Amino acid sequence: MEAVQTAMKRFGQGAVATPANFVTLARILVAVPTLLLIRHRGAGWLTVGLWFAVTSTDSLDGWMARRDGATRSGAFLDPVADKFIVLGGLAALADRGSIAWWPVLLIAAREFGISAYRSVAGRRGISLPAQRLGKYKAFTQYCAVGFVVLPWTASDVGLQHAALGVAVALTVVSGIDIVRHGFHSGASG
């Protein structure tokens, strides 16, 4: 059955020009003016509209890759886009003084640390794909930025701090979960 599903995929591992990769590249391109708006204007309907477009398409490229065939280029580009968008949004908010820098640095350390951990594990033959907790983490990170740029919640500092606190907590917990999966996979493999 798996061989039949694999045979129906439109793209092989080495493909670069795929619909999923085009969506990922479009997310990066739209993120640039979005991050500039966050940094220079803060809350506003254009900013939140672009932020919503960039973040809500996060799962679209993954769905397209699963449908058409996952590629090495997509496996590289998608996490780069995700990190660029979320860390860029958080850094833009910190730079304008809307949030503190320490959560941004903690989230960045986790993101790059786990990427390095996955790379080392991958060289040892251990695959550590994204877990459901990681999807929740990304969603809460996007929401943490969204609550600051959404005009309806732009002045609700308590809500913003709560959202950022949840994002930081899930960031740490999901990182620990990936390391735990790596240790269990290494012990059993």
Image (cartoon, rainbow, N blue to C red):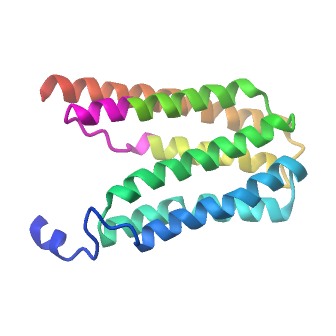
Percent across and percent down for residue 141 are 62, 42
Percent across and percent down for residue 163 are 69, 38
**Rendered position, 137 above or below 117:** below
55 relative position to 21: left or right: right
Splitting the image into 4 quarters, where does residue 99 fall? top right
Camera-nearest residue between 185 and 37 = 37
**Rendered position, 127 above or below 101:** below
89 relative position to 68: left or right: right
**Rendered position, 63 above or below 144:** below
Tell me, yes or no, if residue 127 can be seen here: yes
- 127 within the magenta span: yes
131 relative position to 181: left or right: right
Tell me, yes or no, if residue 1 can be seen here: no
Camera-nearest residue between 93 and 181 = 93
Q: Residue at x 48, y 60 (%)?
A: 59
- Quadrant position of the N terminus in the picture: bottom left
- 141 within the magenta span: no
Please count the marks in the image: 0
Camera-nearest residue between 30 and 15 = 15
119 relative position to 30: left or right: left
Q: What stretch is highlighted in magenta?
A: 117-133
Percent across and percent down for residue 100 are 78, 28
Splitting the image into 4 quarters, where does residue 74 fall? bottom left
Q: Which residue is drawn at 46% across and 65% down?
A: 61
Percent across and percent down for residue 108 are 59, 32
- Quadrant position of the C terminus in the picture: top left
**Rendered position, 140 above or below 70:** above
Q: Which residue is drawn at 27% across and 76% down?
A: 10
Camera-nearest residue between 122 and 150 = 122
Splitting the image into 4 quarters, where does residue 16 fall? bottom left
